[in-house]
Amino acid sequence: MAKKILLSGVKPTGLCHIGNYFGAMRQFVELSKEYESFIFIADYHALNLIQNKEEMRKAIIDVLLDYLAIGLNPKKVCLFKQSDIAEHTELAWIFDTITTMSYLQRAHAYKDAAANNREINVGTFNYPMLMAADILLYDADIVPVGQDQKQHVEYSRDMAEKFNRIFGETFKLPEAKIISGVASVPGLDGRKMSKSYGNTIPLFAELEEIRKCVMSIVTDSGRGIPENVFAIHKLLRPEEELRKIYEEKNGSYKEMKELLIEDLEKLIAPMRERRKELAGDIPRALKILKKGKKRAQKIASKKMSEIRQKIGVEF
């Protein structure tokens, strides 16, 4: 029996932190053993934020190295770049023609921007259509997302149903696979770990950087278990085992932080060294994207031919 298809896009917007790793990246590696996986670098989505050539190129290479370094196996996963497959934007345009503005105004990104009185570009406004195209082009069965990203898959399902109703059965309806914990990885200040908050621990940090980050974790004065330290630490050890250790070290915040530093270094060091090795041969890493492009292109081209026939532009 053929494996079900998993698809996910990764926006290249800077170096990853441990929140990204525990929230999603680690699960992609595990899920690739169970599903036929397509992971693409969403560089056209990132164009809404990055509009500098050198910055974009660096961001693309960084995310490629990050995912290879954590153990994503290109022999098992089709890893490719969104902009290499023109069918993504072609299908997004087709979806634009059957979508109303009022429907797109319900998207979270648009509502957040409007609530903050930000000037909104067209890319931000209709990004759900490109996202729907990303997903539906490969007949994805599941799309791993956090609870706060479930709307992305709902939009894709809506577009699939609407297109199928207008032009005939064409698209499979994808299911959201909710990744538990994706929205709850805490930062150094107790809020959700996020680059925008400046409260992250970089995924490939050197030991001294790890130490600096951990020692800056906000703790309440007095005795007991420092909740912010414990909340990060339980990502690395079983909670029951960890609570026993913390109770034994009651009040000794420095010892608890030293233990967290030690456990983080055990996790990060092998991936950090692997990333350095990969970064030493960028052309080799880029060949992986080139190979993924060929595989994704074959699937996308076949699907697009079916879609063009359905809408009447291909004979």
Image (cartoon, rainbow, N blue to C red):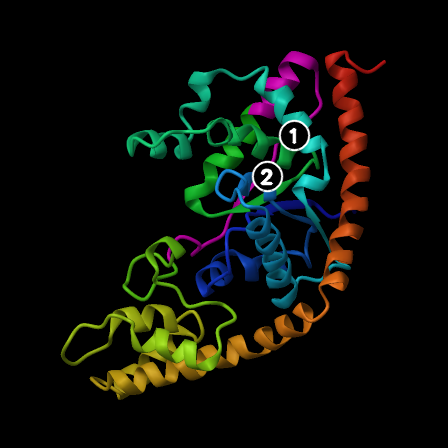
Residue 96 placed where, x, y %? 57, 20
| Residue to which mark 1 is pinned | 89
The amino acid type found where label 1 is placed reads: Thr
**Residue picked out by circle 2:** 44
Q: Quadrant of residue 193?
A: bottom left
Q: Is residue 120 shown left or right of residue 167?
A: left
Look at label 2 and name its amino acid. Tyr
Residue drawn at point x = 78 percent, y = 23 percent: 306
- Pick out the residue farthest to the left: 222
Disc 2 packing (10 Å; few <14; some 14–19; many ≥20): many
Give the position of the C terminus as an image quadrant: top right
Between marks 2 and 1, how big is the CA–CA gap? Answer: 9 Å
Highlighted range, magenta: 159-184
**Horizontal and vertical percent position of residue 241:** 39, 80
Residue at image x 74%, y 59%? 74
x, y percent for residue 230: 32, 73
3 relative to 167, above or below: below
Asked if residue 281 lies left or right of residue 48, the reply is right
User: Which residue reaches farthest right?
Assistant: 315
